[in-house]
Image (cartoon, rainbow, N blue to C red):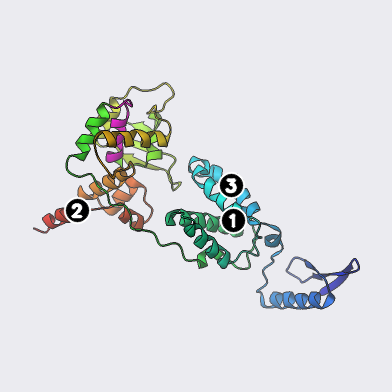
Amino acid sequence: MATFEKRGPYQIRAKVRKLGHRTITKTFNNKRDAEAWARGVEADMDRGAFIPSTIAQRTTIRKALERYQEEVFPRLARSGNDEKARLRRLVNDMGELSLSALEASHVAKYRDQRLKDGAAPQTVKHEIGLLGRVLKHCVMDWGIPLTRGIVTSHVRKPSLPPGRDRRLVDEEEARLLDAAKTSKSKEIEAIIVIALETAARRGEIAAMTWEHVNFVRCTWHIPHTKNGVPRTVPLSPRAVEFLQRIPQRIDGRVWALKASHSITQAFDRICKRAKIEGLNFHDLRHEATTRLFEQEFEIMEVASITGHKTLAMLQRYTHLRAENLAAKMR
């Protein structure tokens, strides 16, 4: 049943009480609007369709994002460092909207403006994905009902450009390793070999520690990954050979190159010295993934090594040569 109270000379507060529901209140400038709202709420309660929106109205996108950063980021790989720039962008553009006011059109407008400003489609997709995860967390973990649902699910994601298909050709691998031998960084040769033999990501290699390398079982455990799922990868005889050459550091790290960007910089210098164009360090992960298939590993075996969670992503990293496929038909 609804009751109405005067709140000063110009405002009316409507209060709806119904068995099985929390008391709902809202303030209006006149009694007509208050009565209309109360009738609508009671009708929704009678149909079992009422979704309380008070908390969502009081909670801004900024508050939800900041709470997510505080509570969830510490559980993510690298403590969510990869997500922080995306979160700041969302806060700057949509932070003052309340959760109840957020519509799919707001997200679509954000998408279009970011693309217009020159952001890469993959970047925008990641940003919208982060917002979607926060909204889902609001509903499932924080008990904040969203009357419009998870609005990001109703927004088209940016179309992604074709994935890179750069592979090592001719004698490029030998030239790379020869150039690495004369590099100031004495580790980069081994790092390149590990990348080619394990299909590991740059950040995973940079964070490699001896406690996770098992020479008896020929395995390397990667506790922190980009998708948050730890995995253990096999080490080939070649990978083991190169790792066993490396003196073990007191701090337990495998490499003196602690930062991912240091690996990139060293690799780029080597490519320049070897006169190899159009190759970046991440292309080695593509190369390694494709080589696993060429060695006739099964899809699930490859996925367990590379850490890809979907077949679609695994396909983007696989670039089989047509001439090799043709040879199998003979």
Q: Quadrant of residue 53?
A: bottom right
Spot occupied by residue 281 in the image (x, y as percentages of width and height): 33, 41
Nearer to us: label 1 or label 3: 1
The residue segment tinted magenta is 183-197
Spot occupied by residue 38 in the image (x, y as percentages of width and height): 77, 75
Vertical side of 203 occupied by 58: above or below: below
Answer whether residue 34 is magenta in the image.
no
Q: Residue at point 31% right, 31% down?
A: 188
For the C terminus, which image quadrant?
Answer: bottom left
Q: Residue at point 39% right, 26% down?
A: 256
Report the disc number at residue 93: 1
> What residue does disc 2 label?
321
Q: Residue at point 52% right, 50% down?
A: 86
Along the line of sight, the residue nearer the viewer: 40 or 157: 157
- Compute the Cα span from label 1 to label 3: 17 Å
**Label pair 1/3, CB-CB below 8 angstroms:** no
Q: Is residue 167 left or right of residue 79?
A: left
Q: Amino acid at mark 3?
A: Gln
Q: Is residue 91 left or right of residue 123?
A: right
Q: How many marks?
A: 3
> What residue does disc 3 label?
69
Residue 193 in view in this figure: no
